Image: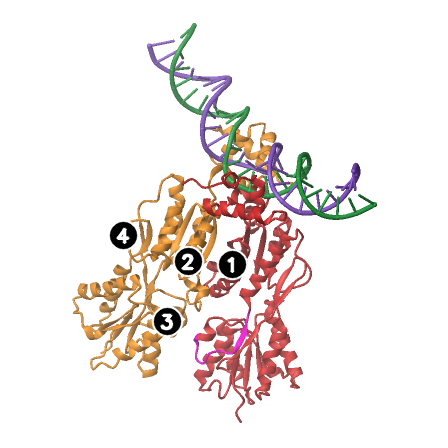
Chain colours: A orange, B red, C green, D purple
Amino acid sequence: MPKATIDDVAKLAGLSIKTVSRVVNREPNVREQTREKVEKAIARLNYRPNKAAQNLASHHSHLIVLIYDDPSAYEIPSAGFIIRMQEGALRACRMANYELLIHPCRYRGKNVVAELNAMIEQVRPDGIVLAAPLSNVRRVVQTIEATGTPLVRVSPGKTNGNPLYVATNDREISSEMTRYLASLGHRRIAFIKGHPGHKAVGSRYQGYLDGLEQSGLEVCDELIAKGDNSVRSGEAAALELLKRRDLPTAIFAANDDMAAGVMRVADRLGIKVPDQLSVAGCDDIALAQQIYPTLTTINQPLSQMAEAAVLMLIESQRKKKKPDSPTVVPGTLKVRESTAARED
Amino acid sequence: MPKATIDDVAKLAGLSIKTVSRVVNREPNVREQTREKVEKAIARLNYRPNKAAQNLASHHSHLIVLIYDDPSAYEIPSAGFIIRMQEGALRACRMANYELLIHPCRYRGKNVVAELNAMIEQVRPDGIVLAAPLSNVRRVVQTIEATGTPLVRVSPGKTNGNPLYVATNDREISSEMTRYLASLGHRRIAFIKGHPGHKAVGSRYQGYLDGLEQSGLEVCDELIAKGDNSVRSGEAAALELLKRRDLPTAIFAANDDMAAGVMRVADRLGIKVPDQLSVAGCDDIALAQQIYPTLTTINQPLSQMAEAAVLMLIESQRKKKKPDSPTVVPGTLKVRESTAARED
DNA sequence: TCGGCTAAGGACAGCGCTGTCATCAAATCA
DNA sequence: TGATTTGATGACAGCGCTGTCCTTAGCCGA
């Protein structure tokens, strides 16, 4: 069964190949009756347009590339992160009949630029989604921009200007979490800051400050500890916070790993969570639902962000213009077992 | 800067486009001197072949599709599994200058067949890697085979005949684990069986039996418990095993999740791991290194299996024949903290 | 009545490569 | 020596579509 081509369809329908092409591509100026004739022929021959030919003639690929930091370079803690991004991107691609190509890359390597250039010029994708932390690497962003391929960055730190990005409301939602803790009666709410290099976790600290203010609480330096996003650093920070004379009744960590560290230390010190100490994190990694007690946290809408990014790319291509306005996908509070009203 | 085409290169090198094509595709019968001329021209123009044109003219796509069961349909426990497969597949693709397309799909849906057909006929990939459990779904396998696309199944249950597959040595390595436990002095080694539907975990049970025999130990029915691969079922099985009059001194679970369940129960019952009880799992999921004590387990070479699968596809295409011989990638013992010599 | 307009459809070039076959010089053979 | 093979290269068709431009018929208003 040799594959049917557009010529076969045209012959069977008694029309020109161009008209078949019009129907296939949903172009205007085809009579309903004609369209039906073509569709019947397509169905009878089980015709599928050849993508390579479409690509060559139309100068686009119906391919979106998702570029992200190669997790195999590290100890795969980011697996969940990537899978969720892929999910969202795939959802959008499927709807628009695009396919998704994945391209992990290590940005520390000297030849990222060459590698990305080669990939882009060979694949000629219709759009690129660049995930954090790569979305903050100027060298990478510039390389991609230079190829002229439409680009959307997901969750970059500096969200100013071009190229376009999709972000989440880290600061606002963190303030909401802080207010939520305050609403449970907590007055001494501690915060563990994340890695200073990470922009997102910086916004979370801002949100914490906002939340305190909005709740009428004062910022207290001795309730603010430093971490570097690792479980270890969460443990260290917790030890420090929990030996204060005046103990905090709630600890809000800038990410879930550090929050997990806090829970571990609390367990070791015999401090009951959430009875004696409420703990909240941020990111909603898989672990948040696996540890005991399950962790109250902020859900990062990774999947929706990636979906939005792909949609922006596809939409802008339809309209033949660059994507123009950034998108903010809000995160949501996930209240679980690790937080409770203050006991007195 | 309009992209350079093969014609530009040919003109600059003073040769025909066909010769340029030969150099680009590493075809034989080109003089060293000629090759250099072409390469110089390519470099000067920064020429990259247009994939769409190559695909159209050569009837292949330089694209491999990795099809797997959609994790977003469940609660993402399989994220690590998928990322590892992707890693391996990407490694092989990169080496051969192929790109990887990912295509999760839910095999329960009525329209899998239509969906896969559409994808395959549009993308026309040069090969497909089908991951478990989809690799066991006859309907899916047959659909793909009917398109004539080269197919390699990864880790299917029934490894008989066509289409080709890549598997691991579940049975042998499980017997090795059992012998390892015996070599630590354990005489009462319990086993927790996995979900009866899963073929792989069935082989592990066989391996356990082999291992006992090879170590000169007798199979004891009351040391064999049933599970269904979940943490919960591991807990249940552990409770059952640990209330026997004559306690086992080691428990080997058919997967890591169940082993984690065992550790949890042991902790609750005040049984020290590994001092009083050795625990071993299988799969080497991320959790295995995260829990305390870290879990002795069997590393599933997922990444290497996927890599092997892609290599088989690419290799067979080079030779213009179907891939022919199945591959077995051996798993390896990961001895960590949860196992120790028997105390008396 | 006629020129001009629009909607529907067709003719055809060409996207940028690869496959096939032809060509031709040099090497090899009888 | 001429015949034959071999290696290196080129000419050219054509992969299966889409973009551009052209044709035609029907319709409008003046």
Q: Which residues are magenta?
A: B290-300
**Residue A257 placement: quadrant:** bottom left
Question: Pointer 3: what residue?
Answer: A294
Looking at the image, tell me whether mark 4 or mark 2 is earlier in sequence order. Answer: 2
Residue B293 is inside the magenta segment: yes
Residue A187 is inside the magenta segment: no
Q: CA distance from mark 4 to mark 1?
A: 33 Å
- Type of the residue with mark 2: Tyr
Question: Pointer 4: what residue?
Answer: A160
- Picture layout, residue B6 above or below residue A235: above
Question: Pointer 2: what residue?
Answer: A68
Q: Quadrant of the N terminus of chain A?
A: top right
Chain at numbered mark 2: A
Position of residue B120 in the picture relative to residue B163 (left or right): left
The location of residue A248, given as percent across then percent down, is: 23, 76
Check if mark 1 and mark 2 are on a common chain: no
Q: Quadrant of the C terminus of chain A?
A: bottom left
